[in-house]
Image (spheres, helix red, strand yellow):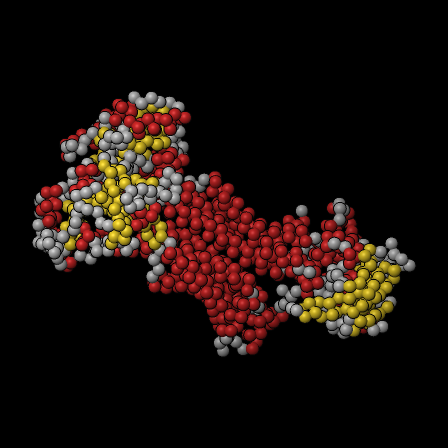
Amino acid sequence: MSQNGTMIKVDHVSKSYRRDSIEIPVLRDISIDVPAGEFLALMGPSGSGKTTLLNLIAGIDRPNAGKVVVNGTEIDSLGESDLARWRARHVGFIFQFYNLLPVLTAFENVELPLLLTGLSRKEKREHVESALNLVGLGDRIHHYPKQLSGGQEQRVAIARAIVTDPTILVADEPTGDLDKISAGEIMDLLDRLNKEFKKTIVMVTHDPRAAEKAHKQMHLDKGELTT
Amino acid sequence: MFIIRLVLKNTLRHKLRTLLTILGVSIAVMSFGFMRTIVTAWSAGVESSGENRMITRQSVSFIFPLPYSCLQQLQQIPGVSEVSYANWFGGVYKDPADFKNFFPRIAIDPETYFSLYPEFIIPADQFAEFKKERNSCIVGAKLAREQGFKIGDLIPVDGDIYPGKWEFVVRGIYRGKDESTDETQLFFHWDYLNEQVKISQPGREGQVGWYVLSVHNAAEMPRVAKAVDERYKNSRSSTKTETEREFQQSFVSMSSAIISSLEAVSYIIIGIILLVLANTIVMAARERTKEYAVLKTLGFSAGHVVGLIGGESMLIACSGCVIGLAMTFPMAMGFAKAFPTFFPVFNVETITIILAVSVALFAGVVAALFPAARAVRMRIVDGLRSID
Amino acid sequence: MKIPFSYTWRSLWARRLTTTLTLGGIALVVFVFASVLMLAHGVEQTMIDTGGDDNVIVLRRSANSELVSQIDRDAANLIRTNPGIATGKDGKPVVSTEVVVIINLERKDIANGMGNISVRGVSPEAMPLRPQVRIVNGQMFRFGSHEIIIGTNIANRYRGTGIGEQLRFGDAMWTVVGHFEADGDGFESEIWGDVEQLMPAFGRPVFSSLTLKLRDASAFEDVKKLIEGDPRTQYTDLKREKAYYSEQSKLMSDFIKILGLVVTIIFSVGAVIGAMITMYAAVANRTVEIGTLRALGFRRRSVLGAFLVESVFLAIIGGAAGVALASLMSFVRISTVNFGTFSELAFGFTLSPSIIVSAMIFSMLMGIVGGFLPAVRASRLNIITALRSS
């Protein structure tokens, strides 16, 4: 369980990438603590490493050095399949370009993460419907992504992210591809998830209006924290 | 299962591409089935050999005759139950360049030949008529169909081995016991042949092309073969006796080079199936790199992704296989019609179907190997960044 | 404005894997196509080479091979006297009276494998009649003895054919004293001996055929009419040796051609489909590019042309690879029973310029057919829609 209410602990983490034979450092010795129920915005210029940090927290990448502990689990030391299972249970990921599967309906897209659980058909349907209702798309469940607007697609993506009731929500530029109004709607939704449902949210964003909704902002530049 | 549904939906994404791929695979499977059918048809004679029939012929080669006097001597060899004899007549019927006119014309002894070959079924009344007339003949049902022979028709043949103008009257049409029996032969009286030879080429009469023996007990065959050949070893007509199966096999082996070439071609076909299928699967997998990364993000395992790719590959391979096999049958039938007597028995064998299915499954697996490996190894973050 | 060629080959390079797979498919099809043509050509070549330009073969009328032909001594002697026949250095007419039978020999490579081998009894004139026949091992047989020579195709593949070994047929033993080559033609698959020794051994009182050399090659028709017109030899049939041998191969080469072409046509459909899939994918992936090119001012025609060129270029490379592979088949020789004569014959895969040209045209056709529809689609894309797609 969490110590002192810390949900996410990033401890002296470094990460670099190899391009051909050149090593490019992306994160240099970063440490952050995110308490449970926090809404954190990670900001910084292009190439600052904020998305990389997000990826490490979400368990879709591994650090070269240091530890990442989420809700008491040291995820950097888990094996591939354990990590996959961990992700399924504990992380809800929201992408900038929604990343819905085009061949599946809204309902089926939201259902995806539930297929990894042992829930019955009825239970799965209930979860999907309540997630879609929560994001305000109860009437569009059988539409395909190409029949939805950008804002609607993102809401489906958010429904997918919360349907398993994950421990943390991770969002990478969630409003990056949306117009002002839709962006505002999305941020209101995230705000509600945080305040009402007490979800810990870590969000990467460029958008200052989006960042305003967060409790706390951290800035990164060239792989280091500047605030 | 969900994966199956997703696989199905994925294949329907690019209907034209999926359709073309299935078409390509099915054409290749059809060719494969066709090639293998030719290969099996070549050995059809071997398969339809009698269980305990043996052939005795001149040891130097098939074209040298044995004396008629051997008949009685062979009948007395212990273990032999029945003996019959036949001569290959050959000759030229109509235009020899037309494949259709190439069918076996054989002089036989009516009393004994058909009891050794019970698979040739002749109606009793026709057989009685046949026995009465000297220059009558019995033709196979398939041959009769192809050439339009009916009872009472006169078949003129220009002799070559036995020169002269010959005519045979159709008095009977035989059916084969099952579909692997040759129904394209023409049989006439050996006595008639012998009489004519006595007149036109005195000194050449009393010669038999080969003897057919049956034994009481199939296990006796090697011993009987040895006994026969020993008896004639040092005479002018030394013999070679072997089971009918071995006899047929030796003919097949003469064309072994051609058969091997056909087999080689059928392997090349497998290669083509693979290339067409792999091409499509590689493209499809590449397009969905980001989606696979998203699935992995959601917690689906590498196994799931492999299942998606492999499933799509298998689905296309199997669809192509089913359609291809369905097309093989009419194609085989068309070929059999064009060359009815060249391959008297031309069926799509079960083994061919089994092979075709195995090949399709194999292709389905192999085509997916490379893209599946790539998808498994791809790191989630790289996959998400992919713009394909 | 024409779209530069570098766009074409760089686009192919950018999608190397698919390009390679498609190339592979086309190469395989062209390989099979070219090999089949080479094989049929090889059969014909072997048989045609077997004949001499001024040689004539005499057979019985309606016998379509020497095996079933019979010519008696009297007729043979009469034919000898025809003035149209060339005379040799010894003043005798260049006529070889021959007998041909088939014997079975055991194959070295397949257990219980058997071959039908032609044994040809010849007269001394046979050697000058067929200058391509040369002893390569041992020596020529002596006329009047039970010696034989064996063609290299048989000597290599059948048991009992080594120099000094003996074969038993007729009711005598025959000693192998030499091996001969004959430029790869039909004679190389035969066994030769003295006709006067072989005939009694085989119990054949008559010859199978005569081969004679014309004094004047263009006088063939006259000689033929004279001999066939004479009531004592009217049952004979004269043919130019080359014509006779090419007839012998007709059944075989027709079979190969028909089978081969059926197979190739089917294969080519498969390859065309492969090319189509690749080109459709190429178009789909480069929609934005195409929109850009059109926005820049390139006409529809140029876009169509560019994609068609890409497809044909792909096909040409694949075709060239297929032809190169097929040319390796020239090193392969196939020995099998010739349907026409029922005896063993060896032939190879012979490449010819016309085969290369046919194969390349064939592959280009595949490229055009496979690439046409996708190229049309590319040229018909609406500029705005294309630019907006991603």
Q: Nearer the viewer, residue B22 or A32?
A: A32
Is C64 on the left or on the right of A96, as rendered? Answer: left
Q: Position of residue A172 (x, y in %)?
A: 76, 65
The extreme right residue here reads A4
Is C64 on the left or on the right of A99, as rendered? Answer: left
What's the residue at 63%, 58% (across, down)? Answer: B374
Is B283 on the left or on the right of B240, as rendered? Answer: right
In the image, residue B150 sits, relative to residue C350, either above or below, namely above
What's the residue at 18%, 38% (across, down)? Answer: C200
Q: Position of residue B49 (x, y in %)?
A: 38, 33
What's the residue at 38%, 44% (across, down)? Answer: C109
What's the residue at 10%, 42% (across, down)? Answer: C74
Q: Position of residue A199 (x, y in %)?
A: 84, 59
> Which image quarter: residue A226?
bottom right
Q: Nearer the viewer, residue A105 or B91?
A: B91
Residue B110 appears in the figure: no
Q: Position of residue B102 (x, y in %)?
A: 29, 42
Q: Nearer the viewer, residue C252 or B155?
A: C252
Residue C12 appears in the figure: yes
Q: How many marks?
A: 0
Image quarter hosting the C terminus of chain C: bottom right
Is C18 on the left or on the right of A3, as rendered? Answer: left
